[in-house]
Amino acid sequence: MIAMRNKYNNYYILKCDIKKYFYSIDKNTLYKIMRKYIKDIKLLSLTKVFIYDNKEEKGIPIGNYTSQFFANIYLNELDKYIKEKLKIKYYVRYMDDFCMLLPNKDICKDILDKINLFLKSYLKLEMNDKTFYYPSKFGVNFCGYIIKENKIILRKRFIKNIKRKMQKDNFELLNFKGHLIHANSNNFIINILKNRLKIDGINKVIYIADKFEDITISKNIKIIIEDEINKVKELFNNNYDINMINTKVLLNLNDINKIIFALNK
């Protein structure tokens, strides 16, 4: 993206998605493609059984491991067309979701027309209404992130999903670590952990913070906790009772009791 910005200043992003992809894969075309790559007769025969496992002319089961493999191989033909025929340098695909960086709107229109023609004529597929092109300033919305030249942002839908699962389904923040660590998400992580002090307690929050292996997260959480501990001490010294202190700090009753017990020693 930085290379495109340096070369064209204001470039465009073409974002594409295949309409009902798994249900639209043409079995004859898929088998024809597989024959190019599989030379072993027995393996090819087994592959044919998997492809033609029902009487439908189109579509492969979404849940099968073989279907995921077949679906990727199927669009490998599109990958080669875009990279080798259309000579698009900045192109990426994840299953049926793909995007590319292009110099301007007119080139986007031209490339999109060519891709549509290739999909219909060779792979018997169509784009859905999620396919569009737009100026680069909005970033690339891809695989759960908004990717910009200087940062990677979590999608709002993903953030809502995390909060919902933590609140309703007892998921922990570490369940989402693999996704979070690839984005500029430190502030989000710190804010979530800060608000979990009431629920999880000091020790668990510090443990989770350290598991992210980012010194900024660990340092900021420990500063927040230290500030809350000092608030408890100040309120207690001003003769506030435990229940009143509990309403004024982020810490839970168990941690508050420990702090007060230490003060009374």
Image (cartoon, grey):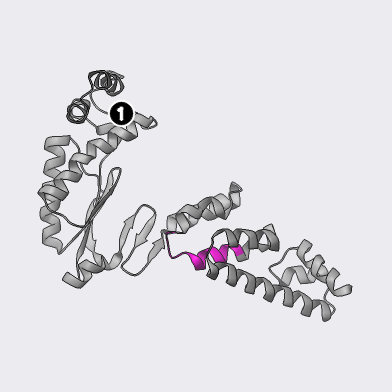
**Magenta part mainly helix, strand or loop?**
helix
Residue 202 appears left or right of 28:
right
Q: Position of residue 247 (x, y in %)?
A: 73, 69
Residue 183 colored in magenta in the image: yes
The number of numbered discs placed on residues in the rendered structure image is 1
Judging by the rendered image, the residue that carries numbered circle 1 is 60
Q: What kind of residue is marked 1? A: Ile
Quadrant occupied by the N terminus: bottom left
Between 120 and 85, the one lying in front of the other is 85
User: Is residue 132 positioned above or below 194 on the image?
Assistant: above
Q: Which structural element holds mark 1?
A: loop
Tell me what residue is drawn at x 18 percent, y 39 percent. Answer: 77
Tell me what residue is drawn at x 16 percent, y 55 percent. Answer: 88
Tell me what residue is drawn at x 49 percent, y 56 percent. Answer: 160
Quadrant occupied by the C terminus: bottom right
Q: Position of residue 41 (x, y in %)?
A: 22, 19
Q: Which residue range is magenta in the image? A: 182-193
Residue 72 appears left or right of 197:
left
Tell me what residue is drawn at x 40 percent, y 63 percent. Answer: 153
Neighbour tally class for label 1: few under 14, some 14-19, many 20 plus, Cα within 10 Å: many
Residue 10 colored in magenta in the image: no
Q: Position of residue 94 (x, y in %)?
A: 31, 46
Q: Quadrant of residue 158?
A: bottom left
- Asked whether residue 130 appears in the rendered view, the answer is no
Between 19 and 259, the one lying in front of the other is 259
User: Is residue 104 positioned above or below 16 on the image?
Assistant: below
